[in-house]
Amino acid sequence: MAELFAQYNYVIVIILMMTGLYTIFASRNLIKKLAGLSVFQTSVFLLYITISKIKGGQPPILLEDKKYGYDEDGYALLDGPISVAAGDASYILPGPGSDVIYSNPLPHVLILTAIVVGVATLAIGLALVVRIREVYHTIEEDEIEAADFIYNLEGTAD
């Protein structure tokens, strides 16, 4: 049980993922399906962020200016840590051979892109639901399928 609590992020991701999938498959309302899709997308975002987290990881920000102790190839000119003042804050950059762990920014950039795509997908889905509502006067799949069946049999709309 302690292992389950140690990995609580993954438990939350799985619960959100299954909730979103269940909502997509079980609901016959188009708005509820889009809400389930959003919940599922959010669970995927949380999964990627959880996987990319590195304990003790530092932001991968390196200053490559000679006055801060680096030459044009990116090698440190000094043997120890370098103190850098930028505005009101000061930073200490690691020297050569240090055991600093840097976080990989790529997963976070991909998640930002995925969020934008998810919002665009939701907006297009909602626009389609509005148009379907104008044509069929409902957003329930059962009623839409029944109207299509009647239209295809009789060739006219009610």
Image (cartoon, rainbow, N blue to C red):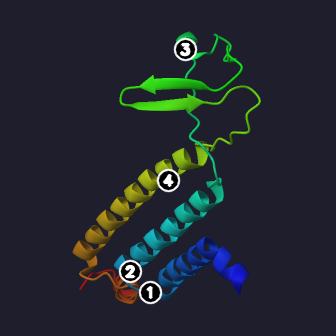
Horizontal and vertical percent position of residue 47: 60, 64
Please tell me how many numbered marks the rendered image carries.
Answer: 4
Residue 29 picture location, percent across and down: 37, 84
Which image quadrant: the C terminus?
A: bottom left
Disc 4 or 1, which lies upstream in sequence? Answer: 1
Q: Rate crowding at label 4 as few (under 14), some (14 to 19) or many (20 or more) other CA atoms within 10 Å.
A: some
**For the residue marked with disc 4, what is the amino acid?**
Ala
> Mark on residue 65?
3
Amino acid type for the residue under numbered disc 1: Ser
The disc, 2 or 3, on the residue closer to the chain's N-terminal end is: 2
Say what amino acid the circle numbered 2 marks. Lys
- Nearer mark to the viewer, of 3 and 4: 3
Residue 84 placement (x, y as % from top left): 50, 24
Disc 4 target residue: 114
Mark 2 vs mark 3, CA separation in Å: 54 Å
Q: Dot 2, crowdedness within 10 Å: few (<14), some or many (≥20)?
A: some
Verify CB contact (< 8 Å) between mark 1 and mark 2: yes
Residue 27 is labelled as 1
Badge 4 marks a residue whose secondary structure is helix
Residue that numbered label 2 is attached to: 32
Label 3 amino acid? Asp
**Label 1: how many Cα within 10 Å (few below 14, some 14–19, many 20+):** some
